[in-house]
């Protein structure tokens, strides 16, 4: 029987472990933290709970690719989903879904009202957006489809892609300038890049329609099929918090014979010649294995667990070249007042600048805006009332932030929490006065949670054009790299789909 060790119990590690166990491998998962999930985690204090990682997840519906993975692993019925979407607010206007559903293109109509002189460009851009939406749906479906049906899906993707191929190498800045002239309209579509801490000038243009698909703005939009082959993707909140996504997969690993060890850090990956042989744990125990799959920070996984001197120079240089996102500063609140009176949507992004390029550059250079450039407010208890005591609410407020600030995060935690809450109180008055529980998470805290002491990357690989993550396949036979700093990139659904793909490749090679 093949023995597999998985290092890290995030979404990628757990999904790989589950597929390997399902295939008959003997599987052991070693996680440094006290809980599974990585950043797909729900924290609790004083009767309140908050998600600290992904807030909205995509393509987990029963007919979608992520849902297919959950079904294959036997845990789809254990993950409760609540249709979810996000709204955006700028200094001069808001783009909130209307109370009464008015069709899949209400946002296009709203933008034409706000920017009438940009109407022709809006129409042209929405034709591109529809094409990309269809491509994503077909791609997601093909990732969980084998045999002749997969060929049909890829052929359909080619047909959809050819008309927009001319934009393939355009940056987001160039693409937006092609369709629009108004910087405020451009900011509506590029603002989400601030969450990735990537500048429009360095982000791939076709990624803009991907991150702005209509399903992300209104969960009521029907998940219609594309050419009768694949459903368009939807977005959801996880009922009870994202721990109820990672937890069921971990449970299935155990039910299929695998073992998940928490509080069990790995000290070293053992190799012999060009093969992996197992791992050494922090308590000095040796675990022999035919396969080792490692997830987490690329530098930590390879330079600390193997050693730079034991890696080919070209591979080590690739690790050094991986661009990483910046961190976040997060304030979790347990409120005795109802925030829904002031924010009727579960998740709203509040942008206070239209200069996305400049704002991201400032963060990358280590200058923290203290919430003045923007933040989001997420009411966890709105989609899951179990995340707060009856009559109370759990609220997450966070903004992107550099890993280091002058004076250090440790010494300025309370100051920065207060400054962020001052900004948030422009939306929900009296937040501080009605706070029963407050939990702040600085970039230093996230470094400890993610076990990346030098640099915490909130979403993993920073999606810069021409840059890629570390390949899944490594210079050592039997050693595979997975997770958000790998070639797959970040995102919950991306992780579980790439994990399926990696295990499929492993089985084929063996």
Image: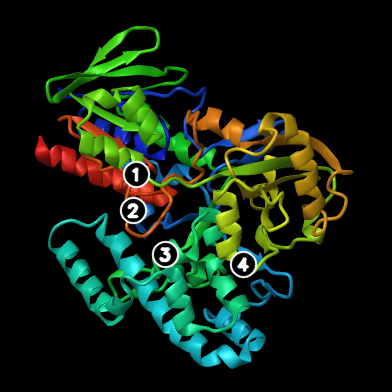
Q: Can residue 494 be seen in this view?
A: yes
Up-down: is 330 above or below 375? above
Lower position in the chain sequence, tag 2 or tag 3: 3
The residue carrying mark 2 is 467
Residue 275 lies, in percent from the top left, at 14, 24
Q: Which secondary structure, mark 2?
A: loop
Q: Which colour scheme is used?
A: rainbow
How far is disc 3 from disc 4 in space, using C-alphas? 30 Å
- Residue ID at (43%, 48%): 492
Numbered circles on residues, count: 4
Residue 265 lies, in percent from the top left, at 41, 18
Please state if 9 lies on the left or on the right of 354 as rendered. left
The residue carrying mark 3 is 233
- Mark 4: give few (<14), some (14-19) or many (20+) Cα within 10 Å: some
How far is disc 4 from disc 2 in space, using C-alphas? 24 Å
Question: Which numbered disc covers residue 321?
Answer: 1
How far is disc 3 from disc 1 in space, using C-alphas? 32 Å
The residue carrying mark 4 is 355
Q: Which secondary structure, mark 3?
A: loop
């Amino acid at each position: 029987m093949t023995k597999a060790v998985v290092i890290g119990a995030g979404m990628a590690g757990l999904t790989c472990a589950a597929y390997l166990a399902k295939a008959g491998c003997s599987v052991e998962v070693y996680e440094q933290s006290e809980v599974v999930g990585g950043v797909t985690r729900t924290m609790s204090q004083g009767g309140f709970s908050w998600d600290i990682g992904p807030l909205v997840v995509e393509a987990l519906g029963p007919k979608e690719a992520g849902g297919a993975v959950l079904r294959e692993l036997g845990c789809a019925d254990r993950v409760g989903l609540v249709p979810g979407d996000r709204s955006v607010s700028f200094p001069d206007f808001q783009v909130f879904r209307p109370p009464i559903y008015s069709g899949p293109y209400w946002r296009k109509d709203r933008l034409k009202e706000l920017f009438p002189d940009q109407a022709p460009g809006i129409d042209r851009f929405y034709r591109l957006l529809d094409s990309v939406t269809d491509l994503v749906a077909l791609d997601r479906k093909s990732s969980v489809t084998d045999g002749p049906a997969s060929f049909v899906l890829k052929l359909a993707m080619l047909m959809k892609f050819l008309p927009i191929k001319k934009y393939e190498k355009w940056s987001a800045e160039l693409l937006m300038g092609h369709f629009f002239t108004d910087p405020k309209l451009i900011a509506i579509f590029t603002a989400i890049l601030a969450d990735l801490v990537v500048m429009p000038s360095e982000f791939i243009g076709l990624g803009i329609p991907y991150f702005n698909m209509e399903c992300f703005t209104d969960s009521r939009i029907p998940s219609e099929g594309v050419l009768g082959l694949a459903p368009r993707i939807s977005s959801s909140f996880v009922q009870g918090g994202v721990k109820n996504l990672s937890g069921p997969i971990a449970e299935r690993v155990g039910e299929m014979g695998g073992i998940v060890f928490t509080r069990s850090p790995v000290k070293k990956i053992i190799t012999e010649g060009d093969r992996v042989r197992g791992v050494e744990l922090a308590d000095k125990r040796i675990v022999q294995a035919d396969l080792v799959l490692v997830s987490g920070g690329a530098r930590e996984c390879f330079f600390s667990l193997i050693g730079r001197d034991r890696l080919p120079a070209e591979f080590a240089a690739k690790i050094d070249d991986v661009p990483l996102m910046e961190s976040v500063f997060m304030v979790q609140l347990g409120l005795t007042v109802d925030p829904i009176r002031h924010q009727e949507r579960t998740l709203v992004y509040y942008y206070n600048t239209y200069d996305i390029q400049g704002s991201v550059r400032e963060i990358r250079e280590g200058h923290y805006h203290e919430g003045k450039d923007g933040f989001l407010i997420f009411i966890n208890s709105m989609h899951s009332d179990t995340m707060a005591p009856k009559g109370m609410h759990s609220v997450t407020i966070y903004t992107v932030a550099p890993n280091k600030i002058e004076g250090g995060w440790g010494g300025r935690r309370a100051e920065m929490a207060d400054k962020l809450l001052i900004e948030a109180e422009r939306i929900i008055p009296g937040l501080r006065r009605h706070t029963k529980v407050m939990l702040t998470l600085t970039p230093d805290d996230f470094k400890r949670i993610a076990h990346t002491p030098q640099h915490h990357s909130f979403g993993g690989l920073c999606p810069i054009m021409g840059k890629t993550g570390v390949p899944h396949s490594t210079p050592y036979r039997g050693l595979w790299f997975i997770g958000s700093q790998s070639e797959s990139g970040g995102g919950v659904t991306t992780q579980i789909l790439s994990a399926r793909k990696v295990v499929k490749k492993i089985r084929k090679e063996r």
